Amino acid sequence: MPARVSRRACLASVLAAPLRAAISAERLGLIWEGDSLRVAAPRLRFIAGPSLERLKDGASVTYFSQLSLSLDGHATVQARAIDRFVVSYDLWEATFSVAKLSGSRRSASGLSAAAAEAWCLESIGLDASRLAPERPIWVRLDLRTERPRSEETVVGESGINLTRLIEVFSRPASEAQAQWSLSTGPLRLKDIARGPRGG
Amino acid sequence: MRVWLWSAGVLWSGLAVAGEPVPPPESNVNSRYTVEAIELAREHDARISSGLRREMRRLVGSRLDPSAVEDLAREIRRELRARSVSHRVSRGGAPDRVRVAFLVSERPARFEISVPKFLYQSRQGWSAGVEATSRVGDNGFTFGLISDGDELLERFAGIQARYERRRLGSERVGLRVLIQSFHQQWNGATREAAGEGGTAAANGDALYRARQNFEPLATFDLAHPLTLSAGVSFSRLEQPLLAAGTGAANAVVTNLRYHRRFEGSGSQQQELEAGYGLRAATRALSSDYVYSRHRWHFRYTLNRGRHSLIEEVFGGRISGRAPLFERFAAGNGSVARGWDKFRVAPLGGDRLMASSLEYRYRWLQVFYDAASVWTAARVVPQKAVARHSVGVGLRQKSFCLAVAFPLKDGRSDPVFLLGMNY
């Protein structure tokens, strides 16, 4: 005899689905390398969807990242590192190129999409030299694409276009910008896996 | 005042978000490839100007420059009045060659409401306009409301309607018909100087209470980027103290304009704009006022990375008896910023010489203005006195928030300016 499922349970199941997806999403991995905390997120795919379409149309896509460290469960930020990467897709070689435009500038080319993503994540780091190894920490990585430069300019030669202003504010945010957020904690520095230059 | 400052802050932050940094072109790996062809659908290609078509062809054979392609997309959108223009780069027919295709999305709603200009000046108050435009094919119909206390010696408030046709038989010829009806308000200093329209009427200084204007104008694309517009302007002035009650200022109107952008090496870009305008009122057009008004301007802009240097020089000359709306003013939102135009010359002048030097770094701007407005064609000519001012402000696109200081004898009397396209 099949088990009876109430309508309330069914509704709760539907409503809880996104929550479950968020919970099961990848946690941020950390590597202690030298005096720096580096990130690892091998399942994070950010060269995908509309960004990948723009890349395959020959455009470059800019990603902004922010790695923040907290000592009180993300309530206040103790330290943060902000970086900017430009990704482009070589139309003839069918490979990706990445350039880091902030801090120490560097670039790489001839990469697959996964390698380009890994290159960006490996370039993100926080100075952890002043952290006590026993102190609990929380770390969060926010990544977003640049807002595509809209040709539907609100402010132009003819002044402020109120019709377009209404259109812009009516548009869902997800159409304009993609963003990802991964976090981890609480964990202690001494429990984090040591990288190649770990102390 | 606090409410306006808060509104300005909100608007400013909104504009700032839109201005995220642009990556350098060399960060796109495809910029090493040569452009083989530029593609635009035939129905759209037929509607753009020959000058823009030449600009598109110029990219063929050169290395792909993403910023130049974006500039072209923007220009195509502007000329076609399209909703958006995107571009797609794809492999060409031979290795290391690419093709650029522009994709035009037409505007589904051909009705727009816009604010073409607004300004708050701490001495003159508000000036603003709002327009509604409807487009049917190549025809544009605009209706607007305006109240402007900045540009002229009068505050004119009223309505204006405009008909525009971008192509009249040929893509090189356009047509614009302007109809305006305004009521005037006069500053106390101007009223006093004009003697309430009594004796001053002989000099053309009579104060009118209303002004209507009908101005058909044809525009000719002589040789891109040189354009000529020519037409006539029929102005009717309602003067309370004249026996006839009305006066006419009917003039032939001619404007010559040159605007060109030069791409330099790296991030350097230069822009040159020059113009000359003539309004000649004559008895042949049944005008009560007979005069000729010349105005010329020159503007040079040098952009290098986040730095911009702008030099602007303009001047004007009126001969004959011209109504007050034709006379030059200094001490407004664009000429000798920081000065009070009613103290400089409450009746304006028939001669103008002015210059402005401005430096911008990202959002920050500093400027130095110098101007002189005077009257030569009178029984007792006025002396030309140079007025200087300096200012500092924040600018994002055409939106500006600035404070200007007139350089007077030991006094600092700042003027605040907040506005757009003034």
Image (cartoon, rainbow, N blue to C red):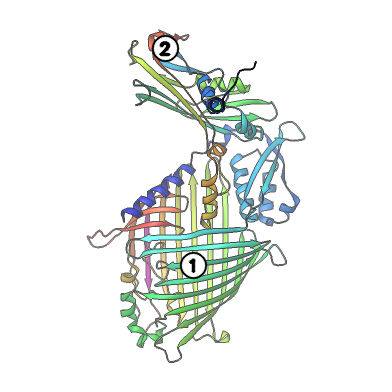
* Residue closer to the observer: B273 or A100: A100
| Residue B269 located within the stretch drawn in magenta | no
Which residues are drawn in magenta? B360-376
Q: Name the mark on residue B304.
A: none
| Residue B365 located within the stretch drawn in magenta | yes
Relative image position of residue B110 (x, y in whole percent):
62, 58
**Residue that badge 1 annotates:** B145
**Residue that badge 2 annotates:** A34
Q: As drawn, is B220 to the left or to the right of A34?
A: right
Q: Secondary structure at mark 2?
A: loop
**Closer mark to the observer between disc 1 and disc 2:** 1
The quadrant in which the N terminus of chain B is found is: bottom left
* Residue closer to the observer: B99 or B62: B99
Q: Chain of mark 1?
A: B
Relative image position of residue B147 (x, y in whole percent):
43, 68
Residue A128 at least partly seen: no
Relative image position of residue B184 (x, y in whole percent):
41, 76
Identify the residue shown where x is 40% and y is 68%: B149
- Label 1 neighbour load within 10 Å: few <14, some 14-19, many 20+: some
B353 above or below A179? below
**Mark 1 and mark 2: Cα distance apart in space:** 66 Å
Identify the residue shown where x is 44% and y is 23%: A140
